[in-house]
Amino acid sequence: MARRSTNTKMRILKAARTLYSVHGFGGTSLGDIITAAGITKGAFYHYFKGTAAVCEQLLDEVVADYEQLAQSIDPDLAPIEQLRNFLETLARLNASGEWVNCRLILRLSAESHESRPQLQRKLAGFWEWYTEFFEQLILKCRSAGAISTQLDPKTQTRLVMSILTGAITLERISPTASAFDNLAELVINSLKAGTTV
């Protein structure tokens, strides 16, 4: 019975992850999740108090996925290779169609969650962590002389995040098979611009 229960909960979360990444929180109803998961309303309420509770758990899982991805980077690599490795992994995951975490975060972040302060806090916490993660990688790359120091580190961090969010958004608007090809090199070349290294 426990396996079936776990399976039902996982189906709810999987369905909600996909729906929220495409339609957002506001565009996804309880009925949409129930239908996509192939369950009853009673089964849904056995696991969650409502759609906000599902969204909150999904955000926890997405943040954990990103943190695990960041921790999987080989610390023995040169800083520029650590950055390249992370970016290539993100590009590959997004191109696979299986990873909807980037779209989910962007979609939820673009929506107003004034009525859902817990969701706001979780999203703000994610963006704080994600920004800090990239800024630290950029600082290491700068110290190693691998990228330009003409721009300040915060601007370089915003540049990296802008390229990533732009690529994800454009792929959603106008899908192409090559949307994420060479994404890592594009980011790294943008950071190197102006260096004499």
Image (tube, helix red, strand yellow):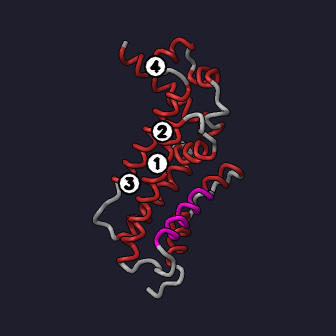
Q: Main secondary structure of the magenta part?
A: helix
Q: Which residues are magenta?
A: 153-167
Disc 1 and disc 2 in contact, CB within 8 angstroms: yes
* Secondary structure beneath label 4: helix
Viewer-nearest of discs 3 and 1: 1
In this view, the mark in front (3 or 4):
4
Q: Amino acid at mark 2?
A: Leu
Q: Secondary structure at mark 3?
A: helix
Q: Position of residue 131 (x, y in %)?
A: 46, 58
Residue drawn 34% across and 53% down? 72
Q: Which mark is residue 59?
A: 2
Question: Badge 1 local density, few (<14 within 10 Å), some, or many (20+)?
Answer: many
**What is the three-letter code of the residue carrying label 1?**
Phe
Which residue is tagged 1?
126
| Element type where label 1 sits in the image | helix
| Residue drawn at 44 percent across, 62 percent down | 134
> What residue is at 46 percent from the left and 48 percent from the top?
126
Q: Is residue 44 magenta?
A: no
